[in-house]
Amino acid sequence: MPDFITRYLDKQVTVTPGQYGSPFWALVYILLVFGGVSLAVVCMNWLERKILAHMQIRLGPMRVGPHGLLQPIADALKLILKEDIIPEGADRFVFWIAPLIILLAVFSVYCVIPFGPTHAITDMNIGILFMLGVSSLGVLGIVMAGWASNSHYPLIGALRSSAQMVSYEVAMGLAVVSAVLMTSLNEQGTGTLSMIGIVRAQYAQHVWFVFKFFPLGLIAFFIFAVAMVAETNRAPFDLPEAESELTAGFHTEYSGLRWSLFMLGEYAAMIAVSSIAITLWLGGWMRPFPNLLSGANWDLAFSLFPALTFFGLAGMTFYSTRRMPKHSYFRIQTMGLGAFGAVFALIGLILLFGPVRERIQDIYWFILKIAVFMYLYIWYRGTFPRYRFDQLMKVGWKILLPMGIGVLMLTGVMGLKTEIWQLVQHLVHG
Amino acid sequence: MEPVATTFFFYMLSGLAILSGVLVITRKNPVHSALALILTLLCLAGLYLMLYAPFVAGVQIILYVGGIMVLFLFVIMLVNLERSQREKTFNQQWIAGVAAAVVLGALFMSIYVKGKALFAQPVVPFPEAENTQRVGQMLYSNYMFPFEIASLLLLVAIIGAVVMAKKRI
């Protein structure tokens, strides 16, 4: 076996493929992340329709496959086969390139997301800065799409989108800075912007930053959590695509494959910003209580969670198989559902193996946290009414921004207090 | 990790920057010009990365591409584009233009000829792992005063903008 493979499979590896300098592993991780995110978007499509439907006491998709499980595939096929229309008078080049820019911006963000200490494409010294910068490029794609369509609704949608994103980026940046400030409370007194470094700092300080300097970390997290919904143009901040006012906003004129690229970009952006929030405030890839409940026994207990989750999913699927109607018309659907359950159980069995279990668990905790955020996104959409535009601006500039500045200043004061306290202790004892 | 194909990326990025810079002034449609300017700024960010200045590159993308250019586009989309399409792109100031180009060219040539003697010692870049930290320390220790003056200037600009934009304060 080639050297770079054996060396990476060794347990001692502590660097990401990018730092390690191996093009092979970097390529493997890029493909894994791209495929994984695309798969996650497909799952999100089904889950969103299903969960929204259940919130509104409907059934949601039920026809294609058992419980509509194959609906996303049918949708994707439909979108690929649909006619691709470029409207008369549109700026063809800009119209063509706009969805690609959105996709490029969103997927570039995944370069620095650490799914585990070694499971990241690369680790940059300016990680969080890079993420904020690149994710802010997405708005360019939206603006270009809206303008190039040569139509009123998309243009208004694009204008709304750019105003909204520029406003909420400020509050978002202030919240991020207060989290970065917390990383500097160590021996050397220097913080870090690297995504892996931020998670390591949380491990070293024995606390997730959301609970640090209670309630300051919590408020900063709240500001970010609101701003990130606005950044991704999701309900209740989905004014750029408000269907009651603007038909579909900036992508009204898009159809077929191009439209599906917008959807892919939107969902991938949701996952990306959620993982920023998770890395900064919710301990990234760390399992619950890595310091308090440490030791070999606890490690073993927590490493069983991924397998147990998949066994739980398999159990749910088998239970649903029992509840399927007994009519012969549903026989194939019941068998299909059973097959889904069997696949889940098989994945669970694979995850029980020692080497797999040890390598997979940080990814598992990260994805579990992302899943919580994704559910929250759907929940927001199911419950909150859409904001009016002046209310949106008021929330951004008059509530979130002053709150962000206040939290940043208080975090600095608290950090200074901690450092002075440490200095005093040092003088007294040593 | 050692950088790969540095020469190739340098020529690619600088070539793209020059090409899109020319496009900025030759396109008749202001939106196309703005998009070409965005490409120029992105290429510059790439060049900063190659000079071992990742922080400057990140800030370049956030501020210029993510902030200022989006506002540029915002304004351009609100103006009437059809009038600007009919107008001439260049306004026949050939003499001034040629003079400026000659002076700039002479400057570049002199730097190219004397550059090796002037900057004999290549500046050692900070190691990549602590580059940003060093920038922060420099800003808040050695260059505190210029930094504060710059922020004061920005504050004055903000107040000035508010005073000019609002009729009644």
Image (cartoon, coloured by chain):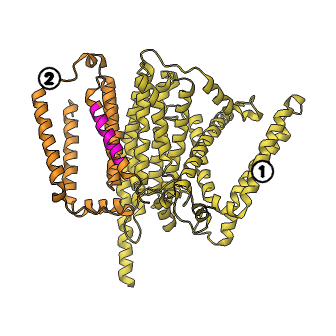
Q: Which mark is residue B92?
A: 2
Spatial separation of the CA atoms under disc 1 and disc 2:
76 Å
- The N terminus of chain B is located in which quarter? bottom left
Q: Which chain is orange?
A: B
Amino acid marked by disc 1: Ala
In the image, farthest residue toward the front: B113
On the image, which quarter does residue A35 sit in?
top right
Is residue A5 in view from this perspective?
yes
Q: Is A303 above or below relative to A42?
A: below
Q: Main secondary structure of the magenta part?
A: helix
Start-end of magenta stretch: B9-22
Q: Is A219 above or below relative to A294?
A: above
Around disc 1, counting alpha carbons within 10 Å, would you say few (fewer than 14), some (14 to 19), or many (20 or more)? many
Relative horizontal placement of residue A83, taking residue B6 as reference (left or right)? right
Q: Which chain is yellow?
A: A
Please report the residue visible at 52 percent of the width from the left and 47 percent of the height from the top: A274
Return the residue nearer the eye: A133 or A228.
A133
